[in-house]
Amino acid sequence: MDHDEAVRQKATERYLLGELHPELKDQFEEHLFDCQDCALDVRAAAMFVEQSKAILSEPTVMLPQRAAAPAPRAGWLTWLRPAFAVPALALLLAVVGYQNLVTYPHLMQAANQPQVGPWASINVSTRGVTPTVIKARRGEGFGLLVNLPPEEGFASYAADLYNPAQKLEWSGPISAATSEEGRQIYIPGRGDQPGTYTLVVRGITTAGESKQVSRHSIDLQVQN
Amino acid sequence: MVKVFRFTTARMIPSSSTSVLNWLTLQHLRGRFLELQSFDESYVERLRAGDFRTQEHFVAYFSELIQLKLRSRLHSPQAIEDVRQETFTRVFAALRSGKIRQPDRLGAFVNSMCNNVLLEQYRASSRDSSLEDEEETDFPALTLDVLGAIAAKQMAEKIREILEEMPERDRRLLREVFLEERDKDEVCRDFGVDRDYLRVLLHRAKQSFKSLYLKNMAARPPGVVAAAKL
């Protein structure tokens, strides 16, 4: 047995665990007596084992002395003292109140209002080479009216929207429609991120298999 | 063929190779750290010439390896000590008569000599079973030099640290294998691990410990002799 083989076979560990076949054991010992590196390795491991036996026989070692850092109960308890708790609670109440009385009603109102913005028509049946151009103001969203092909044999559809960095930004289902219906996808607040977006429409079969039906490029241009 | 040596605490620093053998028993050597020396022609020459430091290093270096080799083969500490001493006696005799022709294979020569003595020990013990029943001889303990004691303490602390950083399960695994000496396959089965896991566990622990072990070896001045308690 040479040194490389001894290292590869983890001969030191096998030797101390008594796992070496008698013939291999003899070979390793012959090498060990001549190789100071392996001798050092075995001596270090043997010392570790011997000392471990002494330490492991101690009952206290079963619980690690290096206990995890104590839970910050003292810290939390500190915060519950009246000097800290009262102003903290008052601040929390003020924030919650503002959100419920002012912020959320405004958001709900905005969400319930009709949306006016740019849009473009995407015909899934056609494979346009030139990108569809949409011009939006800064911060404004845009809509895509997706016309699905009739009787393609798919149970439903799904759409994936990729941003100019070709990262998937959104993915959602589109229920199958008749040839007279379209589906609008509204993409909010992209006016700050001009560039070429990609809309991929996939058909989903009754067996759940997905197949790309069309791929469209949308060039979003920002107007000041 | 097998000799049993005795010595007293009154013996001072020895002057002959046989005296080195008598003086440096396994108990005295335990915990000693040895600087690395090349086993070359110069080393063998110093050994043959009776240089004490070289002899001390030689006996200390190979004693530990011989003990590791013998402990899985002989159950009696006395038998181990007998084989160790006989091995060295024969190696020194071979040195004096110029029989060691390949200095760089000195280690293999020692191993081979040990194998021969071991074989004779087996034969002797099969003839005379009372050898196994021999009472252990308690050699007087010697006071280790201060440097050795400090290093030993550092080693122990490091090993404790390594064990404490292990998950509880791994500690228990090592305990079952090395302290309780249970069958390793059974232990691995109980813990839901394979033998390779056990090997890797030991390997990593040894690697964590080895750097301190090497550092202590390098720091220990050569030729420091354990003081005898008179």
Image (cartoon, helix red, strand yellow):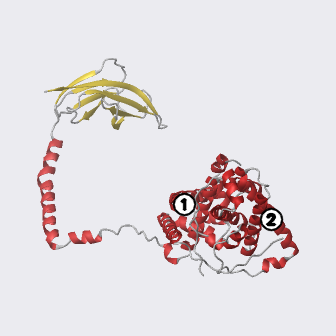
Q: Nearer the viewer, residue A197 or A34?
A: A34
B172 on left or right of A133:
right
Residue B205's quadrant in the figure? bottom right
List x then y, in percent, for residue B32. Answer: 58, 67
Residue name at image x 56 percent, y 61 percent = B222
List x then y, in percent, for residue B67. Answer: 69, 66
B221 on left or right of B177:
left
Q: Are marks 1 and 2 on the same chain?
A: yes
What kind of residue is marked 2? Val
* Chain ID, mark 2: B
Residue name at image x 88 percent, y 74 percent = B127
Earlier-in-chain disc, 1 versus 2: 2
| Residue A149 seen | no
What kind of residue is marked 1? Met
In the drawing, what numbered circle is on residue B193?
A: none
Residue name at image x 84 percent, y 70 percent = B1
Q: Secondary structure at mark 2?
A: helix
Looking at the figure, which quarter contains the C terminus of chain B?
Answer: bottom right
Q: Nearer the viewer, residue A57 or B107?
A: B107
Q: Nearer the viewer, residue B230 or B210?
A: B230
B13 on left or right of B160:
right
Check contact, mark 1 vs mark 2: CB within 8 A. no
Q: Is residue B58 above or below residue A57?
A: above
Q: Which residue is mark 2?
A: B117
Q: CA distance from mark 1 to mark 2?
A: 30 Å
Residue A139's quadrant in the figure? top left
Q: Nearer the viewer, residue A48 or A149?
A: A48
* Chain ID, mark 1: B
| Residue A75 seen | yes
Q: Which residue is mark 1?
A: B217
Residue B53's quadrant in the figure? bottom right
List x then y, in percent, for residue B229. Answer: 59, 80
